[in-house]
Image (cartoon, helix red, strand yellow):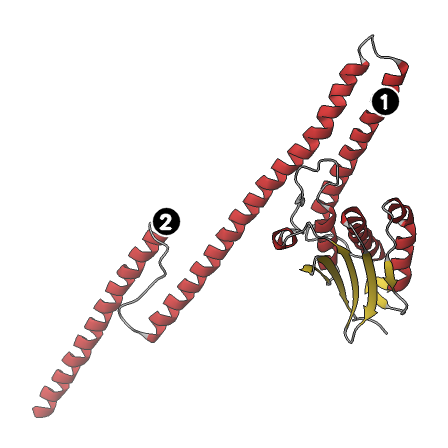
Amino acid sequence: MKNMIYITIAVIIVLLYVFIRFYLLKQEIKNVTKQLHLLNNNATEKKIDIRYFDKNFERLAKEINCQIDVTKKANAEKRLTENELKQAISHISHDIRTPMTSILGYIQFLESDEVTPEMRKEYTSIIKKSAQRLKVLLEDFFELSIIEQADYPVKVEKIQLNQLVSEVLLGLYEEFHQRNLEPEININTDVTIMADPSAVKRVIENLLVNAVKHANGNVSITLEQLHTSAQLTISNSADQLSELDVNHMFDRFYKVDQTRTGKGTGLGLPIAKSLMEKMGGGLTAELVDEQLIMKCVWHLKGLS
């Protein structure tokens, strides 16, 4: 008889424990559901917390909070992308409007009966220059949009980097000469990398053109092979630059002097950085003692 009483009491205790546990879990589910409702309706940004501590429920709450973090990060990146897109549209609209206004204005002048042959020749020259700037802008913008696509093709092959740098420098001789710049060149070593030749050439061209355009004293080009990488360093005097300029240097359409219309599209450096990333390399910029230092790094892998 006593055994039956003990068994009955034990069963009652077990049932009471199960009931209480079930009740608390149900209340906790209601609590978490309410918190998720507030979160999904943007009434709060607070993560999920629990009052009833159960290992399985704690793991569930942890995973929900991880998903909340992922969602917040995705939303932040989305807002950043949207803002960048709005800025890009604003910049390209401005840059397109400037040469277009010039072209249309001088076309109206050409339609006048009072235009002399000399004036007609001058106006035609201005129209050609504006049309060429518009062409370069649209080509750069189109190229950058193509490069940033996930399936952009990169044709990797073995390249003698020192030869390619020399070829690009030779092609830019006239630009250096017009600015009275004599670059300090240190590429006396043979450096072989695996990369896309056309992409590497475009990167070097963009960096050197940027250096020539903005240097006000000296330009230095150094190529060296390190233990696990090849590094091309291009530096130029830049006493007008600030740390803020350097931080935004690879932003699309960013120009140090926004009033300098006609001095480039502001896309050369973003194109160079995107190409380097597509090839698995890196491009950085830093300002040291009024010197802008650009470093291209290619990892030495896949070479036999």
SS category of the residue bearing label 2 = loop
Tell me the quarter of the picture where residue 183 sits: bottom right
Residue at (46, 55) in percent of width and height: 72
- Tell me, yes or no, if residue 34 can be seen here: yes
Residue that lies at the very extreme toward the left in this rendered image: 1
Q: Which of the 4 quarters of the picture holds residue 52?
A: bottom left
| Residue at image location 82% in from the left, 69% down from the top | 224
Amino acid type for the residue under numbered disc 2: Asn
Q: Which is nearer the eye, 285 or 227? A: 285
Query: What's the amino acid at mark 1?
Result: Glu
Residue 54, compared with residue 123, is above or below; it is below
Which element is circle 1 on? helix
Where residue 97 appears, as percent x and y from the top left, is: 68, 29
Q: Relative to 162, say whether 77 is above or below.
A: above
Image: 167 above or below 8: above
Q: Which residue is mark 1?
A: 122
Report the residue marked by disc 2. 42
Taking the spot 31% from the left edge, 61% from the top edge, the residue there is 32
Q: Is residue 184 left or right of residue 9?
A: right
- Vertical position of residue 191 compared to residue 120: above or below: below
Residue 204 at x, y percent in the picture: 81, 55
Q: Name the spot of residue 291 as percent of width and height, x first.
A: 72, 58
